[in-house]
Amino acid sequence: MPGNDRKGPGWGDGELDVIVGDYFAMLAAELAGKPYVKAEHRRRVEAGTGRSKGSVEFKLQNISAVLDELGMAWIAGYKPRHNYQDAIFAAIDRYLARDPAPLGHVPSELPATPWDLAPLFVAPPPPREPAEHAPRGLSDLVRKYDPAGRDHLNRLLGKAGEEFVLGVERRLLQEAGRPDLARKVRWVAAEDGDGAGYDILSFSPSGQERLVEVKTTNGPARTPFFLTRNEVEVSRERQDCWRLYRVHRFSQERRIYTVRPPLEDALRMGAEVWRASPA
């Protein structure tokens, strides 16, 4: 619920700017694989704000919670806590207005295909009903930075996710004793363009075609995403072999959940844009 995270006055704008800036410095180091010491950063924030250790750590978890809602990576050591002070939304907005780079983060190197593929595939997230009393500031921030639209336009992130899944599909077939099929797996979106209605042509171990559409985000599993009209139509025409791979937390732990058609049975589908012409 909205409100202060401690007894006494809420954090002022100056204090929030200090902690938000320090949070993003830690996040940048984490995503780049550079070492940093959380305790040293926390003590700097304590010194710069006069806040206690507990208050600083709670606010850092608040920031993680907001980034989670924005479909962004967040610091693994600060699990999201959602009872926000309203002013945190404006502080994060101020930071991202100055430095939007975290919004479009793409790993500098393609993540290696994990040796153990079993933990990679997870169940789809349970449905989550919209919060009845979501803070207005949070709703405005999510609308402004639009996680689904942002990921859709981030072609480098999309291509990195597709290439990662390409390696995963080849490894799956190799482990199933079908190196012959692994060699036939094709990155259709890169070789032929985006018009096929899927990104990767793969196979089941029995040899049946598997048409894989990849959607990638740095955010959590529940982050919304766009599907094109063509992708939906192909999923209906080829229900037996079309599959959606939703790659999430891509810049960090990387997980995939899969969806089979009909898509309406597994996804909440809503119109986002309309094709219009004079009546």
Image: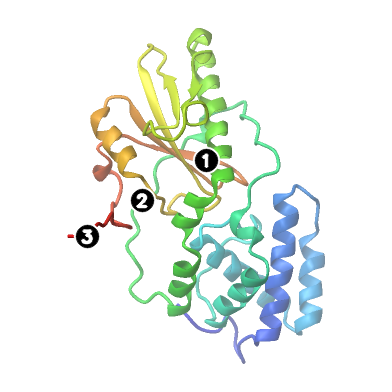
Q: Is residue 84 above or below residue 255?
A: below
Q: Nearer the viewer, residue 278 or 216?
A: 278
Q: CA distance from mark 3 to mark 1?
A: 44 Å
Q: In which quadrant will I find the N terminus?
A: bottom left
Q: Residue 164: where, in percent of width, then height? A: 57, 33
Asked whether the beta carbons under mark 2 and mark 1 sit within 8 Å of each other, the answer is: no
Mark 2 nearby-residue class (10 Å; few <14, some 14–19, many ≥20): few
Residue 220 at least partly seen: no
Q: Residue 55: where, in percent of width, then height? A: 66, 78
Determine which of the numbered discs, if any, sits on residue 218 in the image.
Answer: none
Mark 1 nearby-residue class (10 Å; few <14, some 14–19, many ≥20): many
Residue 234 at least partly seen: yes
Q: Residue 213: where, in percent of width, then height? A: 41, 35
Tell me the element at label 3. Answer: loop
Q: CA distance from mark 2 to mark 1?
A: 15 Å
Which label's residue is closer to the chain start, 3 or 2?
2
- Seen at 42% across and 53% down, the residue is 222
Which amino acid, mark 2?
Answer: Pro
- Seen at 51% across and 26% down, the residue is 191
Asked whether the beta carbons under mark 3 and mark 1 sit within 8 Å of each other, the answer is: no
- Seen at 53% across and 27% down, the residue is 166
Residue 238, located in which quarter of the rendered image? top left
Check disc 2 and report the residue beneath it.
126
Q: Nearer the viewer, residue 123 or 52?
A: 123
Q: Is residue 222 left or right of residue 18?
A: left
Check disc 1 and report the residue beneath it.
255
Which amino acid, mark 1?
Answer: Arg
Check disc 3 and report the residue beneath it.
278
Which label's residue is closer to the chain start, 3 or 1?
1
Which amino acid, mark 3?
Answer: Pro
